[in-house]
Amino acid sequence: MKRKIYITIMMCLGLLLNAQNKKVGINTANPTETLDVNGKSYTNSLYLRNPGEPTMTGGSFLATSQNGLQLYDPNLESSGLFNYLKLTLTGVSGLGITDYDTKIDANNFLVVLHNYSFKLNDGTTNVMLDYGDNGINDNKQGSPEVTAFKSNGTWHVKARFTDSRIIATNTNPPSRGYNNFTVDLYLMAYKRLITKQNINDVNADLGGNDGSTQTITKPSGF
C-alpha cells in the first residue's frame, strides 16, 4: 500500500514539475510541447486560437495550429482529404446539363469544378454552338455556364451555354444534331475538417459602376 502511495506521489510531482515548465505530458515523462499526448485522444469539441502552420514534423495533420494535433488516419476515414473525381455524362441533349445531383454531401465536402469538355458520344470533338433552334447559323454564341453549386444538402453541377444549344458538326454543311453529346467534368472534393461557421452567400449591387468605389460589408466569418 505504501508503495502505491509513493508511486502516486512521484507521478503527481512529475506532472507538477512539468506543468511549472509550461509543458504537460500524458503517457510520456518528457513532453516536448505545451500538451504532449503519447497515444490517442478523444474530444467532442475542439477550439483553436490563432490557427496556423504546424511546427512539428512527421505525420499528416487533420488540423493545424502552433502545436501538432490529431493525425489523419486513412484507415479510419471514409475518404481522403483531397479527392479527384472525373464525372462523365453521356446522352446529353443540346440544352446541356441544368441540374445534376452528384450526391456528395455539401456539409462534409467542398467541391470545385476545375475543368470540363464537350464532345460527341463517339469521342469526336466536332461540336459547336447554335443560337436558337431555327437550323440557321446566326453567328451568335452564349456564355458558358459550367459550375458546381449546393442544393438541398448536396453538390450539384450544371454544364450548358446561355442562349445557345450544343450542335454536332460532323458533316459539311453541319448536320445540326441536337442530342447524344458527352460532357466530361473534372471535380475536386475537399473534405471539410474544421468548420467555424456556415458562411452566408454574398450579394452586392454595384449600381452600374465598376466596383472600385463601392463600400460593402465584410463577409461574415472573415
Image (cartoon, helix red, strand yellow):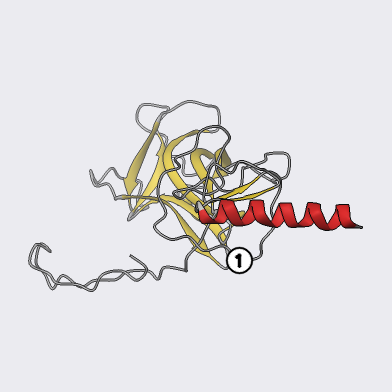
- Look at mark 1 in the image and give the residue it sits on: 45
Q: Where is residue 181? Give x, y as percent.
A: 51, 39
Is residue 205 among the parts visible in the rendering? yes
All told, the count of numbered labels is 1
Q: Where is residue 72? Give x, y as percent.
A: 62, 42
Q: Where is residue 54? Give x, y as percent.
A: 45, 42
Element type at mark 1: loop
Outermost residue, right side: 1
Q: Is the C terminus in the top left, top right, bottom left or bottom right quadrant?
A: bottom left
In this view, the residue in front, 177 or 145, is 145
Is residue 100 among the parts visible in the rendering? no
Q: Where is residue 209? Give x, y as percent.
A: 9, 67
Is 136 placed left or right of 188 in the picture?
Answer: left
In this view, the residue in front, 220 or 100, is 220
In this view, the residue in front, 125 or 215, is 215
Q: Residue at x 57, y 68 (%)?
A: 152
Is 144 placed left or right of 69 in the picture?
Answer: left
Q: Is the N terminus in the top left, top right, bottom left or bottom right quadrant?
A: bottom right
In this view, the residue in front, 7 or 99, is 7
Q: Residue at x 50, y 42 (%)?
A: 188
Q: Up-down: is 201 above or below 181?
A: below
Is 44 placed left or right of 49 in the picture?
Answer: right
Mark 1 Cα within 10 Å, few/some/many (few <14, many 20+)?
A: few
Outermost residue, front side: 2
Q: Amino acid at mark 1?
A: Ser
